[in-house]
Image (tube, rainbow, N blue to C red):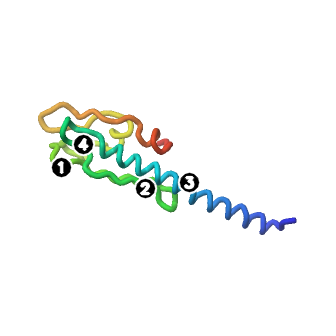
Amino acid sequence: MFTKEKQQQILNSIIENSKVVLREELNKKAKVLEKTYESIMYNATENLIEKASVNISRNMILDVDIKLNKNIPFVDTERQNIPMALEKGGGFLVKGGKPVPTGNYLLRNKLGVRH
C-alpha cells in the first residue's frame, strides 16, 4: 500500500514525463510549421517569409518568430497584425499594389493550438 506522499510522487513523475513527451511531439510539428511558413509565396519567384522559427518552451509556451522578405515593399508592418493575418487570413499591405492575401489556420491545423 502506498502512502499519500508516495502516490503524489508517482503522479508528479507521470505529469513531468508527459510534459516532456508532449513538448517533443509539438516541437516536431513546429518544424513542419516553420517549413510551411517559409513556403508561402508572394509571387511566382519570391517567398513571403524569409525565415520562420517556431518552438515550444519548457513552460509549454508557443514562440513564433517570423522574418518577412526584405525585397517585398510592405507598408507600415508595425501597424499590421502580421501573425493574425497569417493565422486567420487577410492580407499584407504592399506599396503600389493589392494586399497580399494569406492565412489558413496554420497553428490550429499543424499544432492543434487554439487561440
Q: Residue at x 18, y 43 (%)?
A: 74
Secondary element at image label 1: loop
Q: Residue at x 87, y 65 (%)?
A: 1
Secondary element at image label 3: helix
Residue bearing mark 4: 48
Residue bearing mark 1: 70
First reached walking from the N terminus: tag 2 or tag 1: 2
**Mark 1 vs 4: CB contact within 8 A:** no
Secondary element at image label 2: strand
Q: Residue at x 56, y 54 (%)?
A: 22
**Label 4 sits on what residue type?**
Leu
Along the horizontal axis of the image, is 84 left or right of 77?
Answer: right
| Residues packed near mark 3 inside 10 Å, few (<14), some (14 to 19) or many (20 plus) | some
Secondary element at image label 4: loop
The CA distance from mark 3 to mark 2 is 12 Å
**Label 1 sits on what residue type?**
Lys
Q: Nearer the viewer, mark 3 or mark 1?
A: 3
Rendered view: 2 above or below 39: below
Residue bearing mark 3: 22
